[in-house]
Image (cartoon, helix red, strand yellow):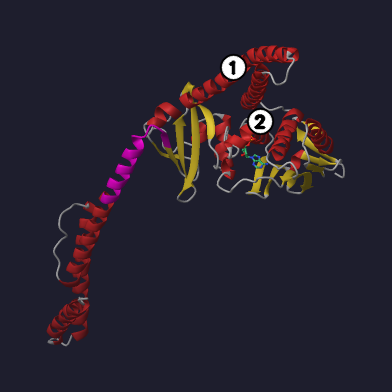
């Protein structure tokens, strides 16, 4: 690095020495030295004033000329300023580019600072959320989107789920809103128009519900006639008799399928009961086990270890259906000499209803998918054993309605354990 202070020191010494030299003719060495230094200071102030004037005007002009260290300082400030300007325009170009791409999105995007005030919003935020940029800049977002559900969501600051709200700008539009944090607790809000999706979903639900209901009556009539025909059949070996038996079997299958479909669409459309019943787990498990044994479980062993003194808050019919499905599956997918165990455990983490079997088991890759509608690991086996492929989907829906979840542990050829995990607040034990 070049050192500029040396020439500057020489300049200062020259100033001082020249004046001190001249003044020493009159024996005034000190006065001359002081005058020399004073003139040097005046000159330095003049240079400072020049740079100040240039900085204040902030033009793109070259910096003023100055000798030595001062000239170097001027040049350095000039280069620094140019570099800053270039950096600023590069940053601005990047921000403009990002804002342009956000602006072209069909979804609304709103940037909010850590105090909840709007920093920026895109074009779609106008017609989806009724926000205007830049007029609404620095406005507190919940003051502009006044929907109580949104205000709660915004203030709770738990954004792991989407929120569905009616658009503040259009009552016919439903929005799916999601917020994420960025930077230092700033928020980025995305809002998507999901009106069509919701309409389609509603149409699908209505269609399934209507078809299932419409199928029930003709099925009942067909079944009635088939049973009457069967009652009049004389010989078991008769060709017609075997066809009749098959028809009855298939009608029964369709009947079960329709019942499951109706149950599923009821779970999707009917709001959950606000007044939960106190369900006696011991009684319920015993009833289901007795029904299963009565319907025939061959040589299988069915052990019920559910205690009598525990109660669950929920919808009795739904819980019965969920537990029955799990137990029916355990029988269905366990060899005729297998063992099935039903148990209940409750602790501070919640209540756990467990159905364990030592049957065929499920290999790991199928486990995440078995609660999907009509998903079967082994289609031929399910059909043979009378499964509809809807049982676990029903269980999952019922548990979701009870703020509970289904845990599946299984090993191929060794058996499975299905656990319904209920929250502790829904469990009442007599010891409480
Ligand atoms: P399905 O009516 O076919 O039994 P489910 O929805 O009840 O339909 O179950 C989905 C699939 O999960 C079944 O087809 C079966 O392959 C598997 N499954 C369910 N329960 C068990 C179990 N206890 N043991 C082994 N596999 C099971």
The quarter of the picture where residue 71 lies is bottom left
Q: Between disc 2 and disc 1, whose residue precedes?
A: 1
Secondary structure type for disc 1: helix
Of residues 309 and 215, the one drawn nearer to the viewer in this rendering: 215
Of residues 99 and 418, the one drawn nearer to the viewer in this rendering: 418
* Crowding at mark 2 (Cα within 10 Å: few <14, some 14-19, many 20+): some
Secondary structure type for disc 2: loop
Image quadrant of ligand 1?
top right
Left or right side of 161 for 309: right
Image quarter hosting the N terminus: bottom left
Residue highlighted by disc 1: 210
Pointer 2 residue Cβ closer than 8 Å to ligand 1: yes
Image quarter hosting the C terminus: top right
- Look at the picture and state if 247 lies above or below 99: above
Residue highlighted by disc 2: 386
Magenta residue check for 94: yes
Q: Mostly what secondary structure, the magenta segment? A: helix
């Amino acid at each position: 690095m070049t050192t500029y202070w040396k020439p500057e020191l020489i300049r200062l010494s020259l100033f001082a020495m020249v004046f001190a030299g001249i003044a020493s003719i009159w024996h005034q060495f000190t006065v001359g030295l002081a005058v020399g230094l004073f003139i040097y200071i005046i000159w330095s102030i003049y240079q400072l004033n020049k740079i100040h004037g240039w900085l204040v005007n902030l033009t793109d002009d070259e910096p003023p000329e100055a000798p030595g260290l001062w000239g170097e300082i001027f040049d350095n400030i000039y280069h620094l300023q140019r570099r800053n300007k270039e950096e600023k325009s590069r940053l601005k170009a990047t921000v403009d580019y990002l804002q342009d791409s956000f602006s072209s999105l069909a979804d609304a995007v709103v940037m909010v600072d850590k105090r909840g005030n709007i920093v920026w919003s895109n074009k779609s935020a106008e017609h989806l959320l009724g926000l205007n940029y830049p007029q609404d800049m620095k406005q507190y977002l919940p003051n502009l989107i006044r929907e109580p559900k949104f205000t709660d969501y915004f203030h709770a600051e738990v954004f792991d789920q989407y929120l569905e709200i009616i658009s503040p700008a259009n009552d016919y539009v439903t929005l799916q809103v999601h917020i994420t944090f960025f930077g230092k607790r700033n928020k980025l809000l995305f809002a998507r128009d999901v009106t069509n999706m919701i309409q389609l979903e509603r149409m699908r639900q209505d269609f399934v519900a209507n078809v299932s209901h419409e199928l029930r009556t003709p099925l009942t009539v067909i079944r009635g006639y088939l049973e009457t025909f069967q009652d009049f059949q004389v010989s078991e070996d008769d060709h017609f008799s075997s066809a009749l038996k098959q028809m009855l079997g298939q009608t029964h299958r369709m009947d079960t399928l329709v019942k499951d479909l109706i149950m599923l669409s009821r779970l999707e459309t009917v709001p959950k009961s606000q007044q939960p019943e106190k369900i006696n787990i011991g009684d319920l498990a015993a009833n289901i086990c007795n029904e299963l044994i009565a319907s025939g479980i061959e040589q299988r062993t069915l052990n019920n270890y559910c205690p009598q003194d525990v109660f669950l808050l929920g919808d009795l019919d739904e819980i019965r259906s969920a537990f029955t499905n799990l137990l029916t599956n355990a029988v269905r997918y366990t060899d005729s000499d297998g063992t099935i165990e039903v148990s209940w455990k409750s602790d501070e983490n919640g209540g756990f209803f467990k159905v364990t079997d030592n049957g065929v088991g499920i290999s790991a890759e199928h486990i995440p998918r078995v609660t999907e509608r009509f998903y079967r690991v082994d289609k031929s086996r399910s059909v043979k054993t009378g499964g509809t492929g809807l049982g676990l989907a029903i269980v999952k829906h019922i548990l979701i309605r009870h703020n509970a979840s289904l845990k599946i542990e299984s090993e191929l050829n060794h058996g499975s354990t299905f656990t319904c995990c209920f929250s502790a607040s829904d469990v009442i034990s007599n010891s409480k």
